[in-house]
Amino acid sequence: MLRYAQDVDGAHSKRRSLRSAEILAVGAELTVGDTRDTNSGEIARSLTEAGATIARINVLPDRLRVVAGAFRAALRRADLVVSTGGLGPTPDDLTREAIALVVRETPQVDPALETWLRQLWTRRGLTFPEINRKQAWLIPSATPLPNPNGTAPGWWIDRPDGRVAVLLPGPPREMRPMWTEHVLPRLRERGLGRGLLSRTLRLSGIGESQVADVLGDQLLRRTNPEIATYARADAVDIRISAVGPASAARAARRGPGRSATQLLDETEALVLARLGAYVWARGSTTWAEAIATELDRLGWSLAIRETGTDGALGSLLGGMPRLRRLEYLPGGRTTGVEIEAEARATASLSRAEVGLAVDARPRRDDTLITIAIATPTGVQRERHLGFLGGVQGRSRAALLASATLLRRLRAIERAGPAD
């Protein structure tokens, strides 16, 4: 029999907007480093894109008091709490027990869930392990979330004060479709992130610390709109978030104020005035998507030859529909004239309009990067010294080659493609 801790208090308002969220990743394998928590990042990204603010992400061991305490605190602070993991059949899978303690409800076997579970074994001619009946548990305030990829149904829990708790399984192949197909659409219907808008600018050729220095404290300390910088593997992102007038009553007292869109427009203009030269994309656009867009507009295809990069450019751009050829060679010593010839030959051999050749080689503790781009309008060659060597240097070579290619294609588009 479960003993219940003090319940989470709250007023009874079921139309609460879900603007703030906390994420709990449950599992000893996460806290000891045996498994990397990728779920939280994916969920946080989709919630942020929907306009919600992520207040905390906690990684927790399989300990009942710890997990229950985290749920209790999160449900007092945030509108939405999402957990992953701890929904298995073994005694150390305690997420259900933890939330039951917090909401003061007793889990019981749901007949429909039990029937579904038993059929998973019956249709395979296997004996149902009674330990798995635990995965058919449900509490009165929870509704089950279907899991076609595993044996752990999720839980959706509505709280009397309008807050929501969502329990998801830990394996990404089970968590991801449950989240995108069953949870996120339902959250949007409930008012996820309502009133909060955001835009993301993607930058290249400048570091995060330089971005922060150029923007300055006055801009970065604003709360509405809020400006945040993120150093990604493929770019430096600037995210601008804004909320419009809080209520009709406030608007009546102080005037209508500016909408979230107006606030975003004004702040984006300030950012672009200072850093517009470095912006290559918006939102979650990848290098492959940005380059593919330019190739589509020109009606051209691309062939790539990379040397000394360990395939970094192919990893970044692979899979593009207009990529006809991608060749990787071990490190060598290519002269400027040779790399121009390689770019032309790469395009010719694959019957592509654009040939991109990149050569990366160590230069003391950094990386010497040579790039050549052959198009119907001519050949362009550039040489750069990339910061750091090894894996980071090779990654910088791929990013620099992509940025150079994108810039070249966009310039051709503005001038008009050759006949």
Image (cartoon, rainbow, N blue to C red):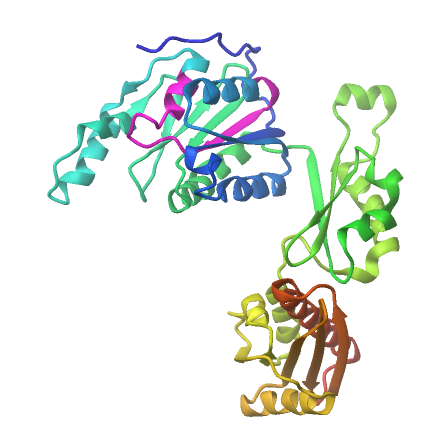
**In the visual, does 117 lie left or right of 331?**
left
Q: Is residue 92 magenta?
A: yes
Q: Quadrant of residue 4?
A: top left
The vertical placement of 399 against 382, above or below, is: above
Q: Nearer the viewer, residue 94 or 191?
A: 94
- Residue at 50% in and 38% down: 184
Q: Quadrant of residue 264?
A: top right
- Residue at 46% in and 14% down: 102
Q: Is residue 51 magenta?
A: no
In the rendered image, residue 371, in percent from the top left (x then y), is placed at 70, 79
In the rendered image, residue 80, in percent from the top left (x then y), is placed at 55, 27
Q: Quadrant of the N terminus?
A: top left
**In the visual, does 328 lie left or right of 417?**
left
- Can you see residue 270? no
- Residue at 32% in and 34% down: 152
Q: Nearer the viewer, residue 361 or 156?
A: 361
Residue segment shown in magenta = 76-100
